[in-house]
Structures are given as structure tokens and as C-alpha cells.
Image: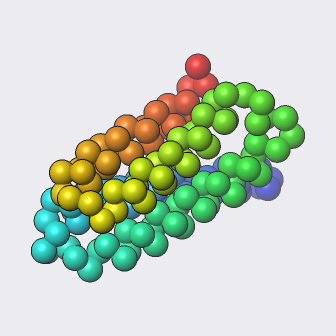
Amino acid sequence: MTMRLIVLFSHIVGMLVFFVALAYEWLVITAPDGHAGLERAVQRLYGIGSGVLLLSGIYMARGGYFEFWWVRGPLILLVVMGVIGGATRRGSISARRTSWFVRLTLALVAVYLMVFKP
């Protein structure tokens, strides 16, 4: 197994962890009383997923691939998702729900760009 395949696998796992964090965050937003303990886990999952995505993505983009916009676009979207999530973390429930839907949409757009490379 080559190093590139290992890094690609870790990139996919990082994406899955990121989407698990989105799912857990939805539980926290919709039923904050029943899932209050998940909030710290959500923050950790976002950190782990984003870190793995960033590091593995940088590794795979080296060698000239960074010039393609389907590589730069998801990186920009990851940063935008982090900014939006951080800005609305302590906001009202309606702001957090809106933020969640926007970040989910941006994450799906990033996956679309990486898979289909339109």
C-alpha cells in the first residue's frame, strides 16, 4: 500500500468524522437538555476531523494539484465553515440551526467538488 492511499484513506476518515460531528451537533441543537454533554465531544470531533482533512489534503495537493480550483475550493469552504461555526457557537438556537444548515450545505458542496471535479 502506497503512502498516497493511506493519506487518501485518512482524508476520507476525516470527512466522516466531520459529518459525525455535524450529526452530533444537530442533536445538541434540537434537544439541548438531553444532550448537553455532547457539546465538548462535538468540538473535539470538529477539531480532529478538520485537522485530519487539512493535513491529508495538503499532503495530497502538493506536487501541483493546488492550482486546481476543486482543490482550493474545499479548503476555502473548510475555513468558512470554521468561521461560521465559531461565530454562532454561543448564539441563539435559531442562529445555530441556520449556521448548521449552511455548514452542512457547504460540506456537501466540498464533497461534490472533490468527488466529481467539475
- The answer to whether 43 appears left or right of 66 in the picture is left
Q: Residue at x 56, y 26 (%)?
A: 116
Q: Is residue 24 visible?
A: no
Considering the image in quadrants, where does the C terminus appear?
A: top right
Q: Residue at x 46, y 48 (%)?
A: 81
In front: 8, or 88?
88
Q: Is residue 26 above or below residue 98?
A: below
* Residue 55 percent coordinates (x, y): 69, 57
Q: Residue at x 52, y 66 (%)?
A: 47
Q: Is residue 102 above or below residue 9?
A: above
- The answer to whether 85 appears left or right of 14 in the picture is left
Spot the residue most to the bottom: 37
- Which colour style is shown? rainbow
Q: Is residue 54 visible?
A: yes
* Residue 97 percent coordinates (x, y): 23, 50
* Residue 96 percent coordinates (x, y): 26, 54
Circle count: 0
In front: 63, or 31?
31
Spot the residue most to the top: 118
Considering the image in quadrants, where does the N terminus appear?
A: bottom right
* Residue 82 percent coordinates (x, y): 48, 54
